[in-house]
Image (cartoon, rainbow, N blue to C red):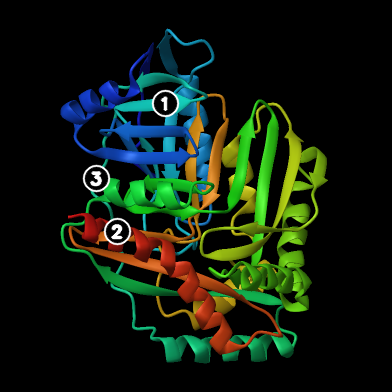
Amino acid sequence: MMEGDATAFPVAIRRIVDPAAEADGLRSAHGAPTAVWRHGDDALTGFGTAARLVFRGPDRVRDAAERWRRLVADAVVDSQVPGAAPIAFGAFAFADGSAADSVLLVPRAVLVERGGRAHVVETPVLHPGGPRTEPPAAAAFPPEAYERAVAAAVERIRAGDLEKVVLARDLVLESPGFRLEDALDVLAQRYRGAWIFAVDGVFGASPETLATVRGGLATSRVLAGTAARSDDPTADDASREALLGSPKNRFEHALAVDSLLLTLGGITTDLTIGRPFALGLPNVWHLATDATAEVAEGVGALDLVALLHPTAAVAGAPRAAALAAIAELEPFDRRRYAGPVGWIDGRGDGEWAIALRSAEVEGPDRVRAFAGAGVVAASDAHQELEETGWKFQPIQEALAAVATSR
């Protein structure tokens, strides 16, 4: 189901020479950014809202891909920048039945900074859409209840009902005077290699690439398997080596890689899967595997996202059994946590991550953070709880740094 449909799409794309000055001017005209996507030195920053398209149900990503394809087919683009195209940002609910909005947001203006060059994509108001739908307040899921849920999941796995399930929990954080831009700056400084994002109230620093498409080449990164980092170099090296050699973590990771192979194998060519490696983030090590493939003409980033979500890395395996277990064992709506988040342009190119290390803004002084852990037959309930604590750290650090700076 789609809401907020738009019928016309005039776009002006102009060169700029001073991104900082341009950003100040766009803030003056439209207020604080409505969408942010940053990776290293590249950034897309949206201001204002030209259209907010809302999608629901099991076909929400496919509907969004088709609606965007039709919308840009009718676009009238006046561009000073060869190859530049209209841009939309997206954030999608994890679950088919979620009460959270799945959206494509077309800003009034997008400041694009990439490869040392910059331009602005401008669009008049098409259909701004209504306010965000707020899901019901989450049910209580304290640490001891989470451990019981993990133990129940292990029993199901050992009984042969499924191989893996990812169980999440949430954490309400009060942050008086919270400013989203400040929190994003902290995340970008500390987690430079992550996807820094803010779309429609969900924000974070995701280390996991769901799918990117550029000029017919698709890439993806699978993360599954986690170990804590240490300030002591010797202990940190030991943690990394233990992760690489852990049968439990390598099994969990292999399930996620197999899920990617099964999904992409039928719609891509020249699919190449790398070897697992330890990806170091400031607070954790992850087992990671990169994949590349070629996509057919007309297949865009959102088409891949629709097929890949939810991956075994954030749901489990087999998919249907894992989703059923999540629905039974988690007492809350994940909203956009672990759902696809990213951007797409008029050519179908785009970058999409999984909304991890993330939170939802619930008010001027309050956010709700989410974190999960993969449960397999060898899982220990207390260790999985501890892992979720590591994964809350990026959001907690950002809020603490913002509070200290005031």
- Where residue 352 sits: x, y (%)? 54, 44
At horizontal 35% and vertical 40% (from top left) the residue drawn is 35
Q: Where on the picture, by quarter, is residue 158?
A: bottom right
Identify the mark at residue 183; answer none if there is no mark. none
Element type at marker 2?
helix
The x, y position of residue 186, in whole percent, is 36, 51
Tell me residue 303's x, y (percent): 61, 40
Q: In the image, what residue type sits under mark 1? A: Val
Figure check: 198 above or below 372 = above
Mark 3, mark 1: which one is toward the viewer?
1
Q: Residues within 10 Å of mark 2 (few under 14, many from 20)?
A: some
Residue bearing the label numbered 2 = 401
Q: Are marks 3 and 2 in contact (CB under 8 Å)?
A: no
User: As shown in the figure, which amino acid type bears the numbered disc 2?
Assistant: Ala
Residue at 28% in and 27% down: 23
The residue closer to the viewer here, 156 or 71, is 156
Locate the C terminus and report the quarter of the image it occupies: bottom left
Give the answer, above or below, for where 114 lies relative to 205: above
100 vs 361, left or right, is right
Instruction: Identify which residue, 326 or 67, lies in the foreground.
Output: 326
**Residue 10 appears in which quarter of the rendering?**
top left
Labelled disc at residue 130: 3
Residue 103 visible in the shown view: yes
**Element type at marker 1?**
strand
The residue positioned 65% from the left and 87% from the top of the image is 154
Task: Bin the neighbour count of mark 3 within 10 Å (Cα to Cα): few under 14, some 14-19, many 20 and up.
Answer: few
Q: Amino acid at mark 3?
A: Gly
Q: Which residue is mark 1?
A: 112
Do the numbered discs 1 and 2 sit on residues whose CB atoms are within 8 Å?
no
